[in-house]
Image (cartoon, helix red, strand yellow):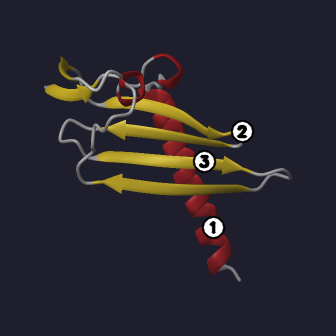
Amino acid sequence: MKIKLWKVVDKQIEKDVSFPIYRKCRLSDDCMSYTRINGDLTAITINEETFVGGGYEYQLEYEIKYDFDRSEIKYHLGLFEHQLTKDEFDNVFNIFIRRIDELKIKCLTK
Protein backbone atom coordinates (compact mmCIF):
# COMPACT_ATOMS: atom_id res chain seq x y z
CA MET A 1 0.00 0.00 0.00
CA LYS A 2 1.26 3.50 -0.79
CA ILE A 3 1.07 6.02 2.03
CA LYS A 4 1.81 9.73 2.02
CA LEU A 5 4.45 11.00 4.45
CA TRP A 6 5.89 14.44 5.14
CA LYS A 7 9.61 15.03 4.79
CA VAL A 8 11.39 17.42 7.14
CA VAL A 9 11.43 20.05 4.38
CA ASP A 10 7.61 20.20 4.39
CA LYS A 11 7.31 18.13 1.25
CA GLN A 12 4.92 15.22 1.08
CA ILE A 13 6.20 11.99 -0.49
CA GLU A 14 4.62 8.64 -1.31
CA LYS A 15 6.25 5.44 -0.13
CA ASP A 16 5.36 1.77 -0.49
CA VAL A 17 5.23 0.08 2.89
CA SER A 18 4.33 -3.33 4.24
CA PHE A 19 1.83 -3.67 7.06
CA PRO A 20 1.61 -4.16 9.91
CA ILE A 21 4.12 -1.56 11.04
CA TYR A 22 5.59 -2.06 14.51
CA ARG A 23 7.12 0.87 16.34
CA LYS A 24 8.39 1.84 19.78
CA CYS A 25 9.11 5.24 21.23
CA ARG A 26 10.62 6.28 24.54
CA LEU A 27 8.31 8.88 26.05
CA SER A 28 10.43 9.38 29.18
CA ASP A 29 13.07 7.55 31.21
CA ASP A 30 10.34 5.35 32.73
CA CYS A 31 7.78 5.19 29.92
CA MET A 32 7.76 3.37 26.58
CA SER A 33 5.14 3.38 23.85
CA TYR A 34 4.59 0.33 21.61
CA THR A 35 2.43 0.60 18.48
CA ARG A 36 1.11 -1.70 15.75
CA ILE A 37 -0.37 -0.03 12.66
CA ASN A 38 -2.48 -2.41 10.57
CA GLY A 39 -3.13 -2.42 6.83
CA ASP A 40 -6.59 -0.90 7.35
CA LEU A 41 -4.81 1.94 9.23
CA THR A 42 -6.24 0.97 12.60
CA ALA A 43 -3.57 1.29 15.27
CA ILE A 44 -3.09 -0.18 18.74
CA THR A 45 -0.72 1.55 21.16
CA ILE A 46 0.32 0.35 24.61
CA ASN A 47 2.07 2.86 26.85
CA GLU A 48 3.99 1.18 29.67
CA GLU A 49 5.27 3.23 32.60
CA THR A 50 7.21 1.74 35.52
CA PHE A 51 7.66 3.30 38.93
CA VAL A 52 10.36 3.01 41.57
CA GLY A 53 9.36 0.24 43.95
CA GLY A 54 7.81 -1.98 41.28
CA GLY A 55 4.61 -0.20 40.37
CA TYR A 56 3.45 0.15 36.80
CA GLU A 57 0.84 1.88 34.70
CA TYR A 58 -0.50 0.88 31.30
CA GLN A 59 -2.56 2.84 28.80
CA LEU A 60 -4.18 1.20 25.80
CA GLU A 61 -5.09 3.34 22.80
CA TYR A 62 -7.01 2.28 19.70
CA GLU A 63 -7.11 4.53 16.65
CA ILE A 64 -9.75 3.94 14.01
CA LYS A 65 -7.61 5.64 11.36
CA TYR A 66 -3.94 6.27 12.03
CA ASP A 67 -2.78 9.71 10.89
CA PHE A 68 0.61 9.88 9.18
CA ASP A 69 1.16 13.43 10.39
CA ARG A 70 4.30 15.53 10.01
CA SER A 71 6.36 13.44 12.45
CA GLU A 72 9.61 11.97 11.18
CA ILE A 73 9.40 9.16 8.64
CA LYS A 74 11.57 6.91 10.80
CA TYR A 75 9.03 7.32 13.61
CA HIS A 76 6.00 6.45 11.46
CA LEU A 77 7.68 3.46 9.85
CA GLY A 78 9.36 2.08 12.98
CA LEU A 79 12.92 2.54 11.73
CA PHE A 80 16.24 2.91 13.60
CA GLU A 81 15.65 3.69 17.30
CA HIS A 82 11.90 3.16 16.74
CA GLN A 83 12.32 -0.39 15.39
CA LEU A 84 10.10 -2.99 17.06
CA THR A 85 9.48 -6.60 16.08
CA LYS A 86 6.15 -8.43 16.06
CA ASP A 87 7.42 -10.69 18.86
CA GLU A 88 8.39 -7.70 21.01
CA PHE A 89 4.96 -6.11 20.50
CA ASP A 90 3.19 -9.40 21.23
CA ASN A 91 5.23 -9.79 24.42
CA VAL A 92 4.24 -6.32 25.68
CA PHE A 93 0.61 -6.98 24.74
CA ASN A 94 0.62 -10.32 26.61
CA ILE A 95 2.14 -8.68 29.71
CA PHE A 96 -0.62 -6.06 29.52
CA ILE A 97 -3.30 -8.78 29.35
CA ARG A 98 -1.66 -10.68 32.23
CA ARG A 99 -1.70 -7.50 34.37
CA ILE A 100 -5.42 -7.07 33.65
CA ASP A 101 -6.05 -10.70 34.65
CA GLU A 102 -4.10 -10.16 37.91
CA LEU A 103 -6.16 -7.07 38.62
CA LYS A 104 -9.42 -8.94 37.95
CA ILE A 105 -8.42 -11.65 40.43
CA LYS A 106 -7.52 -9.06 43.09
CA CYS A 107 -10.80 -7.21 42.58
CA LEU A 108 -12.94 -10.36 42.66
CA THR A 109 -11.34 -11.83 45.79
CA LYS A 110 -11.81 -8.76 48.00
Q: Which residue lies furthest to the right in this view?
A: 53
- How far across and down, in percent of the image, does residue 71 sit? 38, 33
Depth order, front residue of 101/19: 19
Q: Is residue 44 left or right of residue 50?
A: left
Q: Are marks 2 and 1 in contact (CB under 8 Å)?
A: no
Cα distance in 3D space between marks 2 and 1: 25 Å
Q: How busy is the neighbourhood of tag 3: few (under 14 within 10 Å), some, or many (20 plus)?
A: some
Location of mark 3 (residue): 48
Q: What residue type is labelled 2?
A: Asp
Q: What residue is drawn where x is 19% and y is 29%?
A: 4
Residue extending farthest front? 9
Instruction: Please state which of residues 97 and 14 is positioned toward the viewer in this rendering.
Output: 14
15 lies above or below 23 = above
User: Along the polypeptide, which appears first: circle 2 or circle 1?
Assistant: 2
Which amino acid type is marked by label 1? Leu
Q: Point out the residue furthest to the left here.
A: 1
Which of discs 2 and 3 lies nearer the camera? The answer is 2
Q: Where is residue 101 in the image (x, y as percent from the top left)?
A: 57, 62
* Residue in the picture at 47% in, 56% down: 60
Residue holding disc 2: 29
Answer with left or right where residue 64 lies relative to residue 99.
Answer: left
| Badge 3 amino acid | Glu
Residue 13: image location, x then y, percent: 19, 21
What is the secondary structure assignment of the residue under circle 2? loop
Residue underneath mark 1: 103
Dot 1 falls on a residue whose secondary structure is helix
Q: Distance between the residues labelled 1 and 3?
A: 16 Å
Residue at point 17%, 41% (across, down): 40
Nearer to us of marks 1 and 3 is 3
Q: Which of marks 1 and 3 is nearer the N terminus?
A: 3
Q: Which secondary structure lies at badge 3?
A: strand
Quick check: 50 above or below 22? Answer: below
